[in-house]
Amino acid sequence: MAMDLASKIEDATVMLIKAASIYLPLDVKNALIKARDLEVNTLAKAQLEAIIKNCELAEAEGKPICQDTGLISFYVSIGDDFPIKSKLIDILNKATIRATKEIPLRPNAVDVLSGKNSGDNTGRYIPSIDWELIPNSGEVKITVFPKGGGSEGPCIAKVILPTEGLKYAKKLVLDAVADAGAKPCPPTVVGVGLGGTIDLAVKLAKKSLLRPIGVRSEIEEIAKLEEELIELVNSLGIGPHGVGGKTTVLDVHVDCAHRHPASYAVAVLFNCWAVRRSTMTIDSKGNVNFITHEFMNKFWR
Amino acid sequence: MEYYLNTPISDEDIRKLKVGDIVYLSGIIVTARDAAHNRALSILNSGKQLPIDLRGLAVYHCGPVVDKRNGEWVIVVAGPTTSTRMDALEYDFIEKTGVKMVIGKGGMGNRTVEACKKFGAVYTIFTGGAAVLAAKGMKRVLDVHWLDLGVPEALWVIEVDKFGPLMVTIDSHGNNFYDSINKEVYRRLREEIYPKIGVKA
């Protein structure tokens, strides 16, 4: 029974990676279409047209949207009563290796010391796995979030003075976007983490990238800050692929944690326009439900 | 203006291109990223020859997704990677290999502008992330070298047919399309946005 469940999770995870790599989530597609329809700059509009056409081709041909199929991260929320726990590490690793061959993906896991590519997208701590526990649940929820290298380059994390506060945090975000220019493949989604220890700020910024486009923070003041940042960033005029235009970001997501009295951590993370994320749940009987890519349920039995 | 060019690209072809022009390229392009640039330069600096003569060809900043079917390499998808990573190496690369076109995304800096002017080359961009679209212009893999660097970093020699649209963002006359955009972005940031959030530059 346990073996059966393990192989089901592995198979479903291969499909989950496939869904993320080939089919953009609906919120991202709609945001790109909206950006194209709003755009008046002809160069910017042409870039968005190419992006949208590319996504249609990827779906029609079943090929990855981008050649940079990313470094693979998993976000796992596991119910107290779900029968398989630490074994998931091995299962997710195996699924990553299989997905690399079967889709195929580009091998992107490189040994930091030797520079050698492992060839199968796994390695030390990779794929990375983030764990969360869900009380009173018998399900596991798995999100895969492959992230390309271009949008890693301009990411920053910094501790500012508490006396500088929020307005300097805003400045850091705007400076980071201006410095990033065309490099992270705009229109991007920007994730901002405020407070906590610096590693927590980075984690919050990263996790906020998982939030669907257009969904505001549940904290009212943070939601307002997001709206302010979206407007300010888009007034910079960087535009799609830096050719100018209205849309530099598809969204800005902010999250925060209580901070130390003496420090104010700020993290600014980018995701390219190809926000590839895919989520499923599996219950203890092995019933799989693809949530972000519902149509995948048809291919699953 | 729109141009259809073939490799080997002539000096005359290059000199007529201006920033903002669109190019569709046919012939042979060779992929090279950070590691391949480094290796190429160290080979050339030691007086040896590269496995392929790049004179008149285009270098493509790209690490493709490839598949081996019936013993043959096939390009699955192959969009551009961020060119700034190669910026520090491109001057020497253009000078020593004789490539006429650099293809990438995200823009390149002053030294590359200088090289394009001096040695008669251009830098063009393809839409970043549009990897399926890019692969449409690729006919076949002619060869691959340096696979020991890993699939993304290897030199993939690819036959292309009307590969594009490629937008010229650095021409051979000293112009850089991104310079004017960046200047305006930083002006807006400092003069319009900083006062709105109450900070100084």
Image: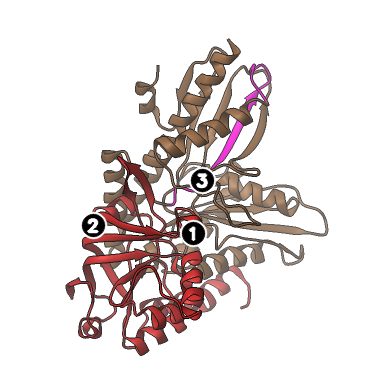
Q: In which quarter of the image is the C terminus of chain A?
A: top left
Is there any visible trace of residue A65 in the rendered image? Answer: no
Q: Which mark is residue A189?
A: none
Left or right? Give the position of B104 relative to A289: left
| Rendered colour, chain A | brown
As drawn, the chain in red is: B
Task: Tell me: residue A216, above or below residue A157.
Answer: above
Q: How crowded is mark 1: few (under 14 residues within 10 Å), some or many (20 or more)?
A: many
Q: What residue type is labelled 2?
A: Gly
Left or right? Give the position of A166 relative to B7: right
Query: Do the dots labelled 1 and 3 sit on one chain?
Result: yes
Secondary element at tag 3:
loop
Give the residue displayed 46% in from the left and 31% down from the top. A14
Task: Tell me: residue B81, above or below residue A7.
Answer: below
Query: Which residue lies under the disc numbered 1?
Result: A150
Q: Which residue lies furthest to the top in this view?
A: A1
Give the camera-side residue of A244 and B94. B94
Determine whether label 1 and label 3 are within 8 Å by CB. Answer: no
Give the camera-side residue of B132 and B69. B69
Secondary element at tag 2:
loop
Query: Which residue lies under the disc numbered 3?
Result: A119
